[in-house]
Image (cartoon, grey):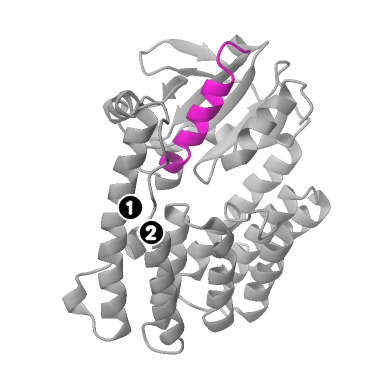
């Protein structure tokens, strides 16, 4: 079970005592608040974003979760609770600027928690204008220094390398990835490091987007080159990925903003079942050209683009050149405008 499944599923409140019982009850409130907010936001979106945006009560619950986390530092369930705070915030994009102090709390008190290696996998998607890549890099290097487990050290190197990539420090990134094999050449993380080195050498802004052919949900063949002359948002996603679902409103805003312009959303699903994707796309009114491959999570297009974490986005210009990687949230529209040649 992954950290995300483990953290979100949890267990019944009666199974715990003390701070963990308090936290479990807050999780029940958060789960209900999240469903209510999602329903209200969906209704607001379908109504054409008319009226005031639905009130979001999840921040208040998260503040209560933080209080429990602080009160349980050093206690048997302290690591679980601190990690859970971070996961709730990250999974549903709640109060993103406060993600970093929640991560720092974990690094300071629980650098060797059993959840750390998987937790680090989320970090490359967490930085914001209020918590820059440099801050995250410093914290992850702190994990590397404090960790005893080799896999945690290797994952920290993979994470810090990706943060270097985001700031254009390709030399430092490659050095971090190459160091992974020196710690343990038999680790499965060595393959991940090789994929990241491939990404450095073939998938950076300014490089040609690798060509591919795939199949739409209706069974029609489609090539990336079919969209030459248009800016393409290449979106790797899955219906089981909460972060992917959370970004759909961002994609919808871009579709609306660039309606009638040379812009297309090319979505590559990593789901196991085509019918699940078709049903979700229809129900969510998810715009774009949607594709699927029977390989599911091992979709060859995702391998070609090293889409290991979901969602993974590439903005590709009208000439087939990569212009941006993962411009999530408010960064998407400016990235598309820049790829169209407009000054932001």
Q: Residues within 10 Å of mark 2 (few under 14, many from 20)?
A: many
User: Which quadrant is home to the C terminus?
Assistant: top right
Is residue 187 visible in the rendered structure shown here?
no
- The residue beneath circle 1 is 34
Residue at 52%, 66% (x, y): give it.
117
- Residue 115, image x, y percentages: 45, 70
The residues tagged by marks 2 and 1 sit, at their Cα atoms, a distance apart of 7 Å
- The residue beneath circle 2 is 58
Overall secondary structure of the magenta stretch? Answer: helix
- Horizontal side, residue 43 vs residue 232: left or right: left
Residue at 70%, 58% (x, y): give it.
132
Quarter of the figure with residue 149: bottom right
Looking at the rendering, the stretch of residues picked out in magenta corresponds to 244-261
- As drawn, the label of residue 135 is none
- Residue 51, image x, y percentages: 40, 34
Quarter of the figure with residue 58: bottom left
């Amino acid at each position: 079970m992954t950290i995300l499944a483990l953290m979100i599923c949890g267990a019944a409140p009666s199974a715990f005592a003390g701070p963990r019982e308090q936290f479990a009850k807050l999780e029940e409130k958060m789960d209900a608040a999240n469903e209510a907010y999602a329903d209200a936001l969906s209704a607001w979106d379908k109504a054409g974003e008319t009226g005031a945006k639905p009130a979001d009560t999840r921040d208040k619950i998260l503040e209560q979760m933080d209080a429990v986390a602080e009160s349980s530092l050093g206690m048997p369930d302290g690591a679980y609770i601190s990690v859970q705070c971070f996961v709730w915030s990250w999974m549903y994009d709640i109060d993103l600027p406060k993600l970093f102090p929640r991560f720092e709390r974990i690094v300071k008190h629980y650098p060797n928690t059993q959840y750390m290696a998987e937790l680090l996998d989320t970090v490359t998607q967490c930085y914001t204008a209020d918590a820059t890549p440099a801050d995250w890099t410093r914290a992850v290097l702190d994990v590397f220094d404090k960790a005893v487990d080799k896999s945690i050290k290797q994952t920290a190197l993979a994470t810090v390398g990706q943060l270097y990539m985001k700031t254009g420090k390709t030399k430092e990134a490659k050095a971090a990835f190459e160091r992974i094999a020196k710690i343990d050449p038999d680790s499965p993380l060595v393959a991940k490091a090789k994929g990241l080195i491939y990404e450095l050498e073939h998938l950076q802004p300014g490089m040609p987007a690798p060509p591919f052919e795939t199949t739409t949900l209706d069974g029609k063949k489609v090539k990336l080159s079919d969209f030459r002359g248009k800016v393409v948002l290449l979106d790797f996603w899955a219906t089981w990925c909460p972060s992917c679902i959370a970004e759909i409103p961002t994609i919808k805003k871009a579709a609306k903003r660039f309606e009638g312009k040379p812009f297309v959303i090319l979505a590559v699903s990593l789901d196991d079942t085509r019918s699940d994707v078709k049903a979700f796309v229809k129900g969510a009114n998810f715009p774009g050209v949607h594709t699927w491959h029977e390989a599911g999570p091992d979709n060859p297009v995702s391998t070609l683009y090293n889409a290991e974490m979901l969602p993974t986005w590439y903005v590709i210009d009208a000439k087939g050149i990569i212009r941006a990687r993962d411009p999530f949230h408010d960064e998407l529209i400016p990235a598309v405008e820049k790829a169209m040649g407009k000054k932001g």
